[in-house]
């Protein structure tokens, strides 16, 4: 990896803008496909704390209400298994996932319990149906009496920090230039080159824009920016009772919106400890109040809003047993489309894009990287990802 802008080439086969999940998975895929003349430009540092790829863990699952996403998740899991072979180590932890809460037949940004059950039945995805008593007997959770649940035993967590390190190593071993602190000012009109803030220009056979919420700033001058909102999403680490540490599930709780409480919460099992050895869980809110959603990425709030922190604390301390204290609080930006689906497509002969990760994209990372790499090589993605095309009404400006 380099911070030396003076040694950048004037030309490259592929320039990737963005050093998070999408950019690094694309670089690693290109490396495995034999493409070595690649420059990846990151405005800050790889997978930095102000972007969506920061953190230790992400969920993976096949429990979806959308049958197309369920099939794509199955393909992504197949590619994850290949990724682990390439890495020579386990990159995921399989411990299951619990959907639980109110069951109403209306989709949220994470789907619904009835919808997920229908799709898993149709596609043969294994699960257990649980009632409130069975949930509370099995896990240190406090479900209301009318709550129901679905447990997908083959789901789990991606160790995103390990994955980022693996992709970086793969790309660097192939000779890719991964350059931090290299913000891009603009794209060439035909998409076939980039101008850095430093004044340097790199011509490219192909450019891949994969800088998340900041993609809009580069694409708007070309009239190619999809319609997106930026949502500030809150998550935190909480220490827990060591006696319960091995019983916490990975979970998602569905509740209807009530007042300023959006009702959607999620959490992980104990996968790490504090610096002094106390077990901790990660938990978060899966909505953002309308007044905090913005169009301009740099306008997003940078500090955790006090009311959201209060709501997350209230949910954890009242619905999960053994919670001790909140020890870290983080705001991450989600780039959201109105249909809560990604944008992954070729925008012009020399320009491809991934954005609109909606907080769900890391589980699809090997598929996203492979698809972007194929587009950069002039090929079509290996599977049908037309649901992510940039011309659909939900994102077409």
Image (spheres, rainbow, N blue to C red):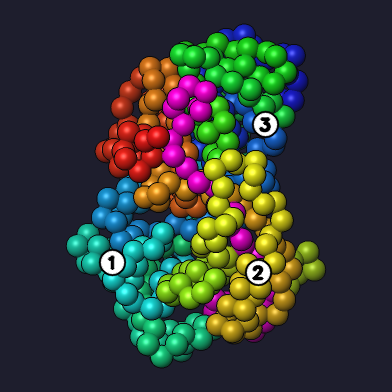
Residue of label 2: 307
Q: Position of residue 323 (x, y in %)?
A: 65, 80
Task: Inspect the magenta stretch and tell me whether residue 237 lies in it.
Answer: yes
Q: Nearer the viewer, mark 3 or mark 2?
A: 2
* SS under mark 1: helix
Q: Residues within 10 Å of mark 2 (few under 14, many from 20)?
A: few
Task: Tell me if residue 358 comes above or below residue 145 in the rendering.
Answer: above
For marks 3 and 1, the one nearer the N-term is 3
Q: Residues within 10 Å of mark 3 (few under 14, many from 20)?
A: some
Q: Nearer the viewer, residue 348 or 36?
A: 348
Which label is found at residue 115? Answer: 1
In the image, the segment drawn in magenta is: 219-248
Q: Position of residue 306 (x, y in %)?
A: 69, 67
* SS under mark 3: loop
Q: Nearer the viewer, residue 249 or 225?
A: 225
Q: Position of residue 189 (x, y in %)?
A: 49, 14
Q: Quadrant of the N terminus?
A: top right
Task: Inspect the magenta stretch and tell me whether residue 375 lies in it.
Answer: no
* SS under mark 2: helix
Task: Tell me if residue 324 comes above or below residue 182 in the rendering.
Answer: below
For marks 1 and 2, the one nearer the N-term is 1
Q: Residues within 10 Å of mark 1 (few under 14, many from 20)?
A: many
For the point 46% across and 72% down, the residue is 257
Direction from residue 36 to residue 74 in the image, left or right: left
Which label is found at residue 43? Answer: 3
């Amino acid at each position: 990896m380099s911070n030396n802008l003076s040694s950048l080439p004037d030309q490259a086969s592929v320039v990737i803008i963005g050093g998070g999940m999408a950019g690094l998975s694309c670089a690693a895929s290109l490396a495995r496909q034999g493409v070595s003349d690649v420059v990846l430009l990151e405005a800050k540092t790889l997978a930095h704390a102000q972007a969506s790829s920061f953190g230790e863990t992400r969920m993976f699952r096949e429990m979806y209400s959308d049958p197309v996403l369920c099939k794509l998740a199955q393909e992504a899991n197949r590619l994850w298994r290949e990724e682990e072979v390439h890495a020579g180590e386990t990159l995921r932890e399989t411990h299951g996932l619990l959907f639980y809460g109110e069951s109403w037949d209306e989709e949220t940004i994470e789907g619904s319990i009835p919808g997920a059950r229908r799709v898993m039945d149709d596609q043969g995805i294994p699960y257990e149906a649980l009632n409130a008593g069975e949930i509370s007997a099995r896990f240190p959770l406090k479900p209301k009496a009318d709550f129901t649940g679905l447990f997908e035993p083959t789901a789990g967590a991606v160790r995103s920090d390990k994955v980022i390190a693996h992709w970086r190593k793969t790309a660097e071993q192939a000779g890719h230039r991964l350059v931090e602190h290299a913000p891009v000012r603009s794209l060439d009109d035909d998409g076939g080159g980039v101008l850095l803030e430093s004044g340097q220009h790199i011509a490219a056979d192909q450019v891949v824009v994969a800088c998340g919420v900041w993609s809009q700033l580069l694409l708007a001058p070309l009239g190619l920016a999809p319609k997106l909102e930026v949502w500030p999403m809150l998550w935190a680490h909480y220490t827990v009772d060591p006696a319960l540490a091995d019983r916490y599930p990975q979970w998602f709780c569905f509740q209807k919106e009530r007042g300023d409480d959006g009702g959607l919460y999620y959490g992980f099992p104990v996968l790490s400890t504090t610096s002094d050895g106390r077990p901790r869980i990660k938990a978060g809110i899966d909505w953002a109040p309308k007044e905090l959603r913005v169009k301009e990425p740099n306008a997003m709030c940078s500090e955790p809003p006090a009311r959201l922190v209060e709501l997350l604390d209230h949910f954890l301390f009242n619905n999960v047993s053994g919670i001790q204290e909140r020890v870290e609080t983080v705001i991450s930006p989600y780039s959201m489309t109105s249909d809560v689906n990604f944008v992954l497509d070729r925008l012009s002969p020399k320009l491809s894009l991934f954005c609109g990760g909606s907080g769900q994209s890391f589980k699809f990372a090997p598929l996203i990287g492979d698809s972007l790499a194929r587009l950069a090589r002039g090929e079509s993605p290996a599977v049908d990802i037309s649901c992510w095309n940039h011309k659909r009404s939900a994102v077409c400006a």
